[in-house]
Image (spheres, rainbow, N blue to C red):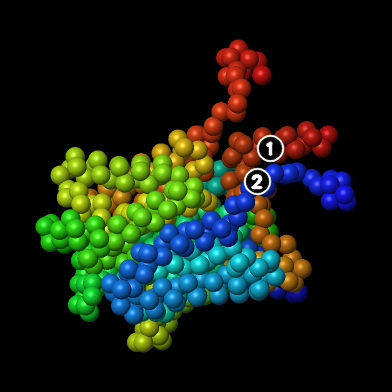
């Protein structure tokens, strides 16, 4: 009886989704590609992933402890950031560099701007770019799968025709730990779609734009789609809630923008890969995209010109 | 004498031009890729600052108010040319490292700000001491920033290897993002120290502190509005 009569302030209807639940879903969706990366690139890949996750969680824990903030490690977002960052690194990277990346992602990009929900850019993307700019040597040294042969070329930089469609789609080619298997990443993406964790607009617009532009310019379509970081970027990193627009129209603009920038960097830039830069650049534009793609409130009547002039 | 000492120490910490007044940001970010560049830039600017403060303080009653900014700039430009020629002749390596930023001391807002805010209103000795204090404060911050960026970005300190032999340096510290990052960290640190010692952190200084408020229309408008409100 007492329970019924207690008057609590709104909201009265709670949705069962929690940050922890959503982040767990993302980890589950990433797991197949991460495990496959470890099989492909051996114990080094597993070590990089472990170091990234442990450092990310430890950074978040220690930051909250040092600044006497409520402990937010339990929401698993640091695990996702660490895992995503690790999957975006080559397996041969020295472990201390991977650790610096995780610290930069959590402390500099996420916590200094106010923690989860307040960061201006995807922490894993920004940390990857910090590492790429800081240690260009170790960030572009990829190993051939299931061997220790060092190569510097992912399929994007290799001569066309080096890799078959099948090896590209299932991930038998050099690359970052978690980006190679388009198949497993798409499976993870479908899981997230079914769980309603992400909306399909950003990945479809992103991948579609790259596909259309590659077709028009005569690039090898399979290499463009499956040879680089497009799948992991479009499905898992561009769809980050904090750093992507809120409305469907805004999401479309965001995805198409990412696609165009990726294509332009790949085709005309000095770098072979542009997915991370494109997402970072569009992350910065998100507040403006949100402002110009506000959804109309239900029953909204556009004020006539006279009223606007008088008002 | 104590008051004169106050003019000198003012620029070192309490009103440090880079960290507390946030002036001269452009050369601060651009040249501090190595500690030695920071020292070179800092000393060049200090010499110009002291000389221009001296000259402007001497001429403060002669320069008409309406054309004072061009007059200040002309005086500053004269001293910058002298310094530039001296550096070119005797320290060619510093000249090469500083590049365009050496002649650009002309438009360094620390120098113009001190001319406008201090030297044009104060006698000669305080003006010179103010210039010296501000200049040394500027040099100290530039050297510190240069040292941090050089240590992390190249693994050296004053071109001597420190960590470069066993750790690959983070090149990002030598690039613009690293510069902004180190600058932000230093401002944050100085704010934290100021807060601990009970001083206010850096805030928006408003039109009153702007060196060009005399010729700026919007500044005059806000001043007039404030005056009207006060009435």
Q: Secondary structure at mark 1?
A: helix
Name the residue at 16% across, 50% down.
A220
Name the residue at 36% across, 70% down.
A35
Near mark 2 (Cα within 10 A), the count class, few <14, some 14-19 or many ≥20, is: some
Which mark is on residue B207?
2
Q: Secondary structure at mark 2?
A: helix
Name the residue at 70% across, 70% down.
A68
Q: Which quadrant would residue B8 be assigned to in this image? A: bottom right
Estimate the spatial distance between the alpha carbons at disc 1 and disc 2, rounded to whole Å.
8 Å
| Whether residue A126 is visible | no
**Circle 1 marks a residue in which chain?**
B
Quarter of the image where the C terminus of chain A is located: top right
Residue B12 position, x and y percent, is 63, 71
Q: Is residue B181 left or right of residue A266?
A: right
Residue A105 position, x and y percent, is 48, 65
Residue B72 or A300: which is nearer the viewer? A300
Q: Counting residues from the N terminus, which is met first, the one under dot 1 or under dot 2?
A: 2
Say which residue label 1 marks.
Answer: B222
Residue B226 position, x and y percent, is 75, 38
Q: Is residue A64 left or right of residue A279?
A: right
Residue B10 position, x and y percent, is 68, 68
Residue A241 or A121: which is nearer the viewer? A241
**CB within 8 Å, label 1 to label 2:** yes
Near mark 1 (Cα within 10 A), the count class, few <14, some 14-19 or many ≥20, is: few
Name the residue at 58% across, 19% down.
A302
**Circle 2 marks a residue in which chain?**
B
């Amino acid at each position: 009886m007492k329970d019924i009569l207690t008057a609590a302030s709104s909201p009265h209807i709670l949705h069962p989704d929690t940050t922890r639940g959503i982040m767990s879903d993302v980890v589950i969706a990433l797991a197949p590609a991460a495990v496959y990366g470890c099989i492909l690139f051996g114990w080094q890949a597993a070590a990089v992933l472990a170091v990234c996750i442990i450092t990310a969680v430890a950074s978040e824990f220690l930051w909250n402890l040092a600044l006497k903030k409520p402990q937010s490690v339990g929401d698993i977002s640091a695990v996702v950031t660490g895992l995503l960052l690790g999957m975006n690194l080559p397996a041969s990277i020295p472990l201390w560099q991977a650790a610096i990346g995780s610290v930069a992602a959590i402390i500099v990009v996420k916590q200094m701007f106010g923690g989860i929900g307040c960061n201006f850019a995807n922490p894993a993307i920004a940390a990857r770019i910090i590492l790429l700019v800081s240690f260009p040597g170790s960030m572009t040294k990829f190993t051939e799968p299931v061997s220790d042969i060092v190569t510097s070329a992912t399929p994007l930089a290799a001569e066309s025709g080096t890799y078959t469609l099948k090896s590209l789609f299932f991930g038998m080619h050099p690359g970052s730990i978690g980006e190679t298997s388009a198949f497993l990443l798409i499976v993870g993406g479908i899981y997230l779609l079914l769980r309603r964790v992400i909306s399909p607009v950003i990945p479809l617009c992103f991948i579609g734009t790259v596909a259309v532009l590659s077709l028009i310019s005569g690039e090898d379509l399979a290499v463009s789609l499956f040879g680089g970081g497009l799948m992991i970027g479009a499905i898992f990193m561009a769809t980050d809630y904090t750093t992507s627009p809120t409305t469907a129209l805004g999401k479309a603009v965001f995805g198409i923008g990412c696609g165009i920038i990726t294509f332009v960097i790949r085709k005309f830039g000095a770098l072979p890969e542009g997915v991370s830069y494109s997402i970072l650049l569009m992350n910065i534009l998100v507040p403006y995209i949100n402002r110009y793609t506000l959804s109309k409130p239900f029953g909204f009547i556009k004020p006539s010109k006279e009223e606007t002039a008088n008002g | 004498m104590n008051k004169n000492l106050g003019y000198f120490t003012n620029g070192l910490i309490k009103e440090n031009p880079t960290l507390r007044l946030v002036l001269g940001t452009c050369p601060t970010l651009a040249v501090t890729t190595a500690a030695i560049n920071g020292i070179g830039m800092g000393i060049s600017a200090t010499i110009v600052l002291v000389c221009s403060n001296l000259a402007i303080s001497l001429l403060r009653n002669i320069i008409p108010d309406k054309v004072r900014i061009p007059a200040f700039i002309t005086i500053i430009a004269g001293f910058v040319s002298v310094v530039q020629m001296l550096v070119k002749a005797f320290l060619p390596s510093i000249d090469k490292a500083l590049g365009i930023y050496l002649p650009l001391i002309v438009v360094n807002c620390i120098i113009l700000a001190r001319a406008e805010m201090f030297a044009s209103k104060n006698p000669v000795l305080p003006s010179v001491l103010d210039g010296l204090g501000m200049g040394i404060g500027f040099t100290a911050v530039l050297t510190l920033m240069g040292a941090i960026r050089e240590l992390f970005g190249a693994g050296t300190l004053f071109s001597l290897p420190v960590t470069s032999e066993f750790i690959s340096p983070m090149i990002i510290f030598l690039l613009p993002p690293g510069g902004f990052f180190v600058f932000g960290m230093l401002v944050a640190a100085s704010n934290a120290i100021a807060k601990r010692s009970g001083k206010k952190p850096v805030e928006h200084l408003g039109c009153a502190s702007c060196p060009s408020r005399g010729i700026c229309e919007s500044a005059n408008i806000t001043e007039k509005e404030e005056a009207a409100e006060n009435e």
